Amino acid sequence: MPDILSAPLVVEFPFTRSLGPVQSAFLTGLRQRTVLGVRTEAGKVLVPPVEYDPVTAAEIRDLTEVAPTGTVTTWAWNPAPRPGQPLGTPFAWVLVRLDGADTSLLHALAAPGPETVRSGMRVRIRWAAERTGAITDIACFEPHDGEAGEAAPHSGEFADPVLGIVTPARLDYRYTPGRAQSAYLDALSGRRVVGERCPSCAKVHVPPRGACPTCGVATTERVEVGPRGTVTTFCVVNIKARNLDIEVPYVYAHVALDGADLALHARIGGIPYDRVRMGLRVEPVWTGGGRHPDHYRPTGEPDADYDTYKELL
């Protein structure tokens, strides 16, 4: 039995979003040190604003300016800030109901310690020195003893409005695949594909999960499948991914390896994209020291009959 594998993984990408009139006004307002909410048909002011009433689903566009002061409704202490968080020293995550709003905004509160934070405390926005039209234009909240502000109507019109944002998204964690997938990955290093058979329904699942997804019983019997298989379904990719050295268009498909009862996700190569079809027989292409097939290519065999893979679509 191979050792259980474990490795750090990072999922990171820039998230690009275009903004509608409400979100555009909200973020542009932050750049101008103005906080905007939106008023529903029932008269509730929502901050941050949304484009549709969460109760009635009606479209809402009635913008309202609220005060930069507010009240903490609930909080949690963060003793060890992570990179990219609003403050580099310990702080409190707080939900703040700004004066004039009926909902709360999540942000950071600069405080010397958890003993100084409480629900009901008064706070105000500390604006970032440089503002670009993003939620980070609010650097954080800080304690405040002044008077409460009021809401006022606002047109939402600003010069040079923010029409889109690009936000980096990152998730880093340590992944331990467990007994079944560790054995699967170990087999791939030897250019073999191994699944596990369910003792109840006798289906062979690839990649194995250690339990049958249908019957819910543990699986331990290992079965080598493939290496050849059949394209069951596919899609043509026409948008080039960043940092991926593959020319578009290309095809990703579900490939049911011979002997498996579950299809794998794989790229199809060695054939023009417009000639890929359901039932196409394919085989893996390994490159260099890769731990998994780079892609699958046609074997030259006759196409598989639909009845042989219709249950794997």
Image (tube, rainbow, N blue to C red):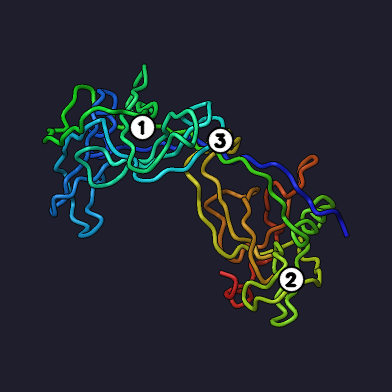
Looking at the rendering, which quadrant does residue 151 occupy? top left
Looking at the rendering, which quadrant does residue 183 occupy? bottom right
Q: Earlier in the sequence, mark 2 or mark 1?
A: 1
The amino acid sitting under disc 1 is Ile
The amino acid sitting under disc 3 is Pro
Contact between marks 1 and 3 (CB within 8 A): the answer is no
The amino acid sitting under disc 2 is Gly
Contact between marks 2 and 1 (CB within 8 A): the answer is no
SS of the residue at dot 3? loop
User: Which residue is label 2 attached to?
Assistant: 259
Q: Give the mark toward the camera: 1 or 3.
A: 3
Q: With respect to residue 255, does 76 lie above or below?
A: above
User: Which residue is label 1 attached to?
Assistant: 135
Q: Earlier in the sequence, mark 2 or mark 3?
A: 3
Q: Please state the horizontal and vertical placement of residue 137, each as a whole percent of the image.
A: 35, 26
Q: Give the mark toward the camera: 2 or 1.
A: 1
Q: With respect to residue 148, does 188 lie above or below?
A: below
Viewed as shown, does residue 11 lie left or right of 226?
A: left
- C-alpha span from label 2 to label 3: 52 Å
Q: Say few, some or many: other residues with alpha carbon within 10 Å of mark 3 (under 14 / 14 to 19 / 20 or more).
A: few
Q: Please state the horizontal and vertical placement of residue 57, each as a whole percent of the image.
A: 22, 57
Q: Residue at position x 19%, y 45% from top?
A: 45
Q: Please state the horizontal and vertical placement of residue 290, each as a whole percent of the image.
A: 76, 43
Q: Please state the horizontal and vertical placement of residue 111, each as a whole percent of the image.
A: 45, 29
Q: Residue at position x 82%, y 56% from top?
A: 187
Q: Outermost residue, right direction?
A: 1
